[in-house]
Image: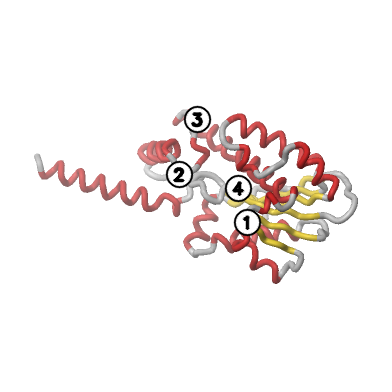
Amino acid sequence: MTDGQLGLPGVGPTWRGALTLGIDEAGRGPVLGPMVLAAVALDAGAARALTRAGVCDSKQLGAGAAAIARRAELAALVRARAPHVAVAVVEADEIDVRVERGELNLLERERACVLIGGAPPCARIIADGATLFAPLRAQYPTLKAYDRGEARHAAVAAASIVAKDERDRRFAAIAARYHGEFGELGGGGYWNGPTRAFLDAYRARHGDLPPEARRTWTRGYFEGAAKQGATSRSRSKATR
């Protein structure tokens, strides 16, 4: 597996006492850019310190430049304080392949297993997503899967911050890549007005979608647009 698929683990300080490994993801829903899973191992002291520093569910920080900057600050604190930090990055083309097979949940579980396998021994594992990660309990008896796992332990909140920060950085690189040709790319890659405008403009100019787009997310939209365009052209010819 390449470094682009699995981020190299951050080597944090030594730890005291049992570790808890938290697992969370960012970017499952967007149409543009990768999905990122993160695993963060914390001892009790690191968990307390990061909670006092403001580490929380990344969604609580909101969107926009200030939120992105705050997540970056908190992610740096996590990497400095946590005994172990690692990320797994899944690009759009692989997501499309697995969505076509109905295996998006399985894909996430596979990446979670890679992250768990690369972590130091942990007394417990807490994953965010009850239905998603519960099947892993047969393989990892110490794993607990919860909805809103960020509220259960600082390790999951820290993983949420790290995953979202990594996704922020990678989306910023995508936006920079296309800025000269299409201007500012807003919307965070989610299926909203700015993202649709960018995809429409890119497709009109290049005849295809950018490689960072998830085609399985956009298929219905562009098929509908193509049918509408064909109907409009037929009506135009009929009135000539």
Name the amino acid, label 2. Trp
Mark 2 vs 3, N-terminal side: 3
Q: Give the amino acid type for the residue marked by disc 4 in the picture.
A: Ala
- Which comes before the other along the chain, label 1 or label 2? 1
The tag earlier along the polypeptide, 2 or 4, is: 4
Q: Which residue is mark 4?
A: 26
Q: Give how far across and how far down residue 102 sits, in percent.
A: 50, 64
User: Residues under labels 1 and 2: Cα distance?
Assistant: 24 Å
* Most foreground residue, 3 or 158: 158
Q: Which residue is mark 2?
A: 191
Pick the front one: 113 or 40: 40
Q: Is residue 2 visible?
A: no
Q: Quadrant of residue 202?
A: top left
Observer able to see residue 95:
yes
Residue 147, disc: 1
Q: Earlier in the sequence, mark 1 or mark 4?
A: 4
Type of the residue with mark 1: Asp
Element marked by disc 4? strand
Q: Is residue 162 left or right of residue 177?
A: right
Residue drawn at point x = 33 percent, y = 51 percent: 223
Camera-side residue: 96 or 128? 128
Residue 161: horizontal and vertical position, in percent? Answer: 68, 43
Q: Residue furthest left?
A: 240
Mark drawn on residue 179: 3
